[in-house]
Image (spheres, grey):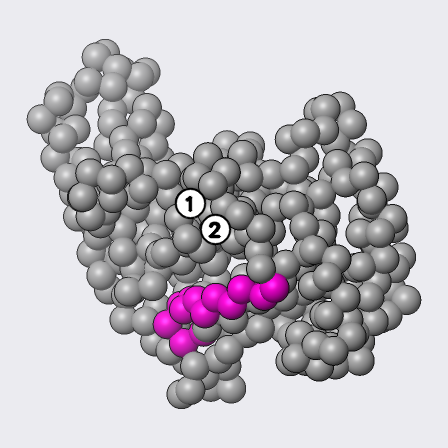
Amino acid sequence: MAGARRKLLLMGRSGSGKSSMRSIIFSNYSAFDTRRLGATIDVEHSHLRFLGNMTLNLWDCGGQDAYMDHYFSTQRDNIFRMVEALIFVFDVESKELRKDIETFVLCLRNLYEFSPSSKIFALVHKMDLVILEKRQDVYRALMKSLEDTSAMFSFQVQGFATTIWDESLYKAWSSIVCSLIPNVALFQKHLQTFADISEADEVILFEKTTFLVISHVTNPRSPGFRSDSTRFEKISNIIKQYKQSCSKLRAQFQSLSIRGTDSTSYLDTMTSNTMIMVIMSHKPDIRGSSNLPGGNDINGDGDESLADEAENNIILANIKIARKMFEKIEMMNPDDR
């Protein structure tokens, strides 16, 4: 099938942080690296392959007044036609918030005319600059205004509080991109099957380059894994930084396994465009029972090592078996589901 193209508008006032977040998510910049970025000149186009068949056409629109005037006058048709999603970035410390909202309204008005089925996302950015006790109040107040404004044009806006200094950026962009993936429900269905067969506590599917979360499954009998609602995005952030460290050492990142006190995590390639993380809690019948003499050492270090190796081989074998199905889903036409 022909590749699906998704046009995304990244808009907001100059200095709001648009190019910084784009560079972190799609160009492997660290938060510190973004300090050397200059202002965006007019519109910067990025064509990003995502999951094989899908291409994200990201239009990073410069936020200076002169450019904004052109977007809403002579370039209206070019900018706002065939838009799949608008990502509007608000600087939470902007001194001209009223003007920022007016610009947002102009975007909605033009999308209503040229792309009425667009998805609307608002990122309330640089939240790290707001004192912790006031963050929720500041975010909710702005989002209430944006929701009321969007409703006037029959749009629903989805908001996120973000900063480049933590995992909130990955949470926002994972949600945005997943809303554009036509087969995301099919990914979810087969990831659930994989988790059930593997008896895994948690399974997460990542896009390989950006490490955005595509889908995840949690075993309801493992409530401890749900204690942190941003754990997937934290993993994205950590692994992305680890990959950058590998690149600096001219080493290629391929797979990873981490054994903790209560669980072991396996990270491996699922398809050419995705990676999968499988989290397995340590089973008492494998590790021994602390109620018996000798505690966790009842089977001896040798038996425990063999059990670890057996579990590792089973998980890798399951990934290998599932690989063909997930590759098929990636290449599938949405009409064939």
Residue 258 figure quarter: top left
Residue at image mark 1: 29
| 163 relative to 332, above or below | above
Q: Nearer the viewer, residue 318 or 15?
A: 15
Distance in Å between CA atoms under marks 1 and 2: 6 Å
Residue at image mark 2: 23
Q: Are marks 1 and 2 in contact (CB under 8 Å)?
A: yes
Name the image quarter holding the N terminus: bottom left
Question: For residue 141: magenta?
Answer: no
- Compare marks 1 and 2 and give the one earlier in the sequence: 2
At which x and y percent is residue 47? 45, 69
Q: Nearer the viewer, residue 222 or 144?
A: 144
Identify the residue at image location x=84%, y=62%.
105
At which x and y percent is residue 52? 37, 72
Q: Nearer the viewer, residue 34 or 273?
A: 34
Q: Which residues are magenta?
A: 42-54
Residue that extends furthest to the front in the rendered view of this protein: 66
Identify the residue at image location x=87%, y=64%.
151
Q: Is residue 324 left or right of residue 34?
A: left
Residue 250 figure quarter: top left
Q: Secondary structure at mark 1?
A: loop
